[in-house]
Amino acid sequence: MLRLHDTALGRTTELEPREAGRLGLYICGSTVYGPPHIGHGRFSLVYDVLRRYLEYSEVDVEHVSNVTDIDDKIIARANEERRSSEEVAELYEAEWWEAMDTLGCLRPTRVPHATAYIEQMVELIAGLVALGVAYETSDGVYFTVSAVGDYGLLVHQSLDSLRSGARVEVNEEKRSPVDFALWKKAKPAEPSWRSPWGAGRPGWHTECVVMSLALLGEGFDLHGGGQDLIFPHHENERAQAVAIGKRFARHWMHNGMVEARGGEKMSKSLGNVLLLTELFERTDPRAYRLLVLQSHYRAPVEVTAATLGDAESALGRLDALSSRLVEAAAADEGASDLVSASGSTEDAGARVRSAFVEKMNDDLDTPGATAVLFDAIRRANVAFDTREQSRAMELTRAVLECFGAVGLIAAGTVEIPESVLELGRLRDFARSKRDFAAADTLRDEIYALGYIVEDTPGGTRIRR
Ligand SMILES: [Zn+2]
């Protein structure tokens, strides 16, 4: 079972889903006001790796990630570019998905848009006002943070220390500097929606609490996002759920940031923001996934020409091994027709798989897991060199399967859906029982799905 560092607990704990075999995951997604940069790429990769690994572990993942399509930054960009906020949001959302597809990130199973949930947000805010934990001012509606006894749980700070650290604001109507906006009254010419407090729009923190509860239900399994969202965003989401009396996320997970040029934080003001489109011009997008995998998800990732270069050459070793397997499999064709390799070589692959799983289950230790796989790559190459063909192939298959489990696909191989691989395994089983009629039926089924079956000494091989 996967163990994860839970931000609320401040330690690693077993990830216990509400319902065995299923996991509801809510990840704060993008505010679509500009092109995505490598920081966005990193968090998307981290949660893509988590999701893929859970699916590899036969957990059914409901992955919800929102799009914030109304926000101050979107309005500012719309004014700058002299177009509507909708147009700005649509344009940058399209860019977002294009970049995520290039990175090989699976699309979330649900993508709620903030503007589609305004009614429910108004309802929540009205409920909070009715409970006396929110109040109206001349520019909006604010949440009374002191109403939540354990406020500061995620950031591990007391309300007093948060209050003294808060930025002093000009807004004198706010009762405390930590109180936050639930509703923002519209300024002239701003896009707005109707509410009991006049025309306006919801605050960002209200958006995520409403959409996560609406789509995943109370006490959903895991809420994630970048470490920069712990406070105030996630603390404030949670505060609203607590105040309205709803059970919120069971577990909290946060990923580290991206650093450029020797530990420097990437930021617009430092002028070191690297867009994903710029990254794709420089390097194979898979190299970025590998770089992210080689760093622990809670640690910062240093993205420089040197670290990307190292990841690219490591990727080259994976691709080269994959080609050796393709060549070896081709050479084997028409030779012996054994269903599976001998026990000892299967063990070599099984040992790689279990070492990989052990590392991954330990708070997604992807640096440890990739080290296991690169060691297996080295041993597979030695086995190929010494003509221990079946051992080499078994090791290589294990490496490709494990990298595939975290979304890293070797060049020349096509990602084959798990459902098709399962048919292949059933076919191996049928052949091992000498039930050739069943094996042929399964081959036809696989063919009908667009894949070709090849018989190799290692078992059924499936190609697109
Ligand atoms: Zn959020």
Image: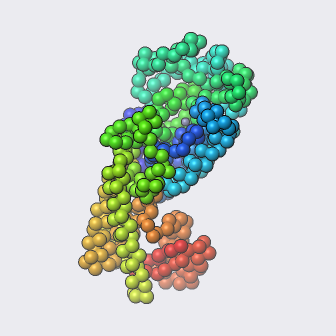
Name the residue at the top extreme: 172
Residue 253 vertical position relative to residue 315 in the rendered view, above or below = above
- State ligand 1's quadrant: top right
Residue sitting at x 67%, y 19%? 130
Instruction: Report if residue 296 is visible in the image.
Output: no
Residue 32 vertical position relative to residue 348 in the rendered view, above or below = above
Q: Nearer the viewer, residue 122 or 181?
A: 181
Q: Is residue 401 left or right of residue 249?
A: left
Residue 340 picture location, percent across and down = 40, 78
Residue 118 vertical position relative to residue 420 in the rendered view, above or below = above
Residue sitting at x 36%, y 64%? 316
Q: How many marks?
A: 0
Q: Quadrant of residue 175?
A: top right
Residue 266 picture location, percent across and down = 41, 38
Residue sitting at x 51%, y 67%? 416
Residue sitting at x 51%, y 30%? 233
The colour scheme used here is rainbow
Q: Nearer the viewer, residue 135 or 185?
A: 185
Instruction: Report if residue 463 is visible in the image.
Output: yes
Q: Nearer the viewer, residue 422 or 323?
A: 323
Residue 244 picture location, percent across and down = 61, 26
Residue 94 vertical position relative to residue 139 in the rendered view, above or below = below
Residue 112 picture location, percent across and down = 63, 42
Q: Quadrant of residue 404?
A: bottom left
